[in-house]
Amino acid sequence: MQLSGGLHNFSNALARWFPTPVRLFPRAAGIDISDASIKWLVLSPSSNAYRVQTYGEEPLHEGVVVNGTIKDIPALAQSLNRVKKNLGGVEYAHAALPEEAAYVFEMHVPDATTREDVLQMIEFGFEGRVPIAPSAAIFDFDVIEERDEGEGQEIGVAVFPRELAENYIAAFGAAGIGLLSLEIEARSIARTVSSGKSDEPVTLLVDFGRARTGFAVLKRGIPIFTSTVEVGGDGITRALMEKLSMSAESAMAFRNDQGLLPEGGTKSPGLDAIMGIASALADEVTRHYHYWDTRRNERGDRMTPVGAVILVGGSSNLNGLADYIAGRVQAPTTIGDIWQHICTFDQYIPPINRRTSLQYATAAGLALRSLEIV
């Protein structure tokens, strides 16, 4: 990802999204920073797959990171330094920038356009798309599709405020961790749950977290749109605790084991407590899904027919959620499998169970980043 304008030098710490020789990338951890914690995951090669070398979570004090923006660089650096001690000797990392601050869109560029010319085209395209000046931004792109001869390329672009990225660089530097790249969270997650193949349908990725839910529209695993809404699974836990006098642990167990399919059926007071948040989430999924699914070009052709919904994030463990959303959008809806590009269960069982793994989708995608570069 570029530091400022289209012809400026690249920062060593910011990601190029194009393949780089593996010798230039040392082994690195995937480090996912949220408002509440830092999650890390390190992969090591094993035969034709990978194994989890180390993983974990370091809590963050309230106010250190707010909506993905670093408010206290020294405090975050101290936490990252503690994380470094658990990386098994790995001294480098790939990290993700928060979707709340991102501007993501798709563009078409002519055939045989050089990288520098594409970056300049992106700069010219800021007006009407990005409310910050190119000099105050970092940005880069992924090629989504090489079209037929003469029709050019389709690319996905992500833009961030430069100051935001520089604060991440400063925190990692102060912690003594070499930051190799930064990218948008949805790109990291897509690296684990998307095949990236030409026959994969346009997918709505839903990252249902504790306090917020992130949405991304993926084409071949490349984000062309992202947004965030203030709907999170913690609201379900609080409702169960208040209405049913449950402990936090009991509420979490009820969410995951019974959820939208409680033993008491539709008359269960637990279901009543859950439905408010579940319905609000489903409304947002439906709104995003139908907007993108029904977009048409000037010829009346559907531009982004959405063919699937994938759920990740710890709150996606709510029992019955996938079927509930599938019924609302009338499309296949599945819980993401973050291990599909890492290992096969016939050969290796990761130390992170399926439910917990949904919280590590971003970290796993970041850890895959340098291992998959050839």
Image: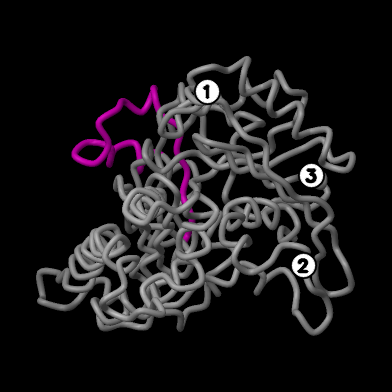
Q: Are marks 1 and 2 in contact (CB under 8 Å)?
A: no
Place of residue 349 in the rendered image (x, y in percent of width and height, measured from the top left): 79, 73
What amino acid is labelled 1 in the image? Val
What amino acid is labelled 2 in the image? Pro
Report which residue position mark 2 lands on: 350
> In the rendering, which numbered label is found on residue 224?
none
Query: Does dot 1 land on a helix, a strand or a loop?
Result: loop
Category of crowding for the residue at label 1, using alpha-carbon neighbours closer than 10 angstroms: few (below 14), some (14–19), many (at least 20) = some
Residue at image position (37%, 65%) is 152
Residue at image position (40%, 44%) is 211
What amino acid is labelled 3 in the image? Leu
Q: Are marks 3 and 2 in contact (CB under 8 Å)?
A: no
Q: Is residue 47 left or right of residue 232?
A: right
Task: Decide whether residue 167 is among the magenta residues.
Answer: no
Query: Does dot 3 land on a helix, a strand or a loop?
Result: helix
Between disc 3 and disc 2, the foreground one is 2
Real-space CA distance between mark 1 and mark 3, rounded to the nearest whole angstrom? 32 Å
Magenta-highlighted residues: 120-143
Report which residue position mark 1 lands on: 64
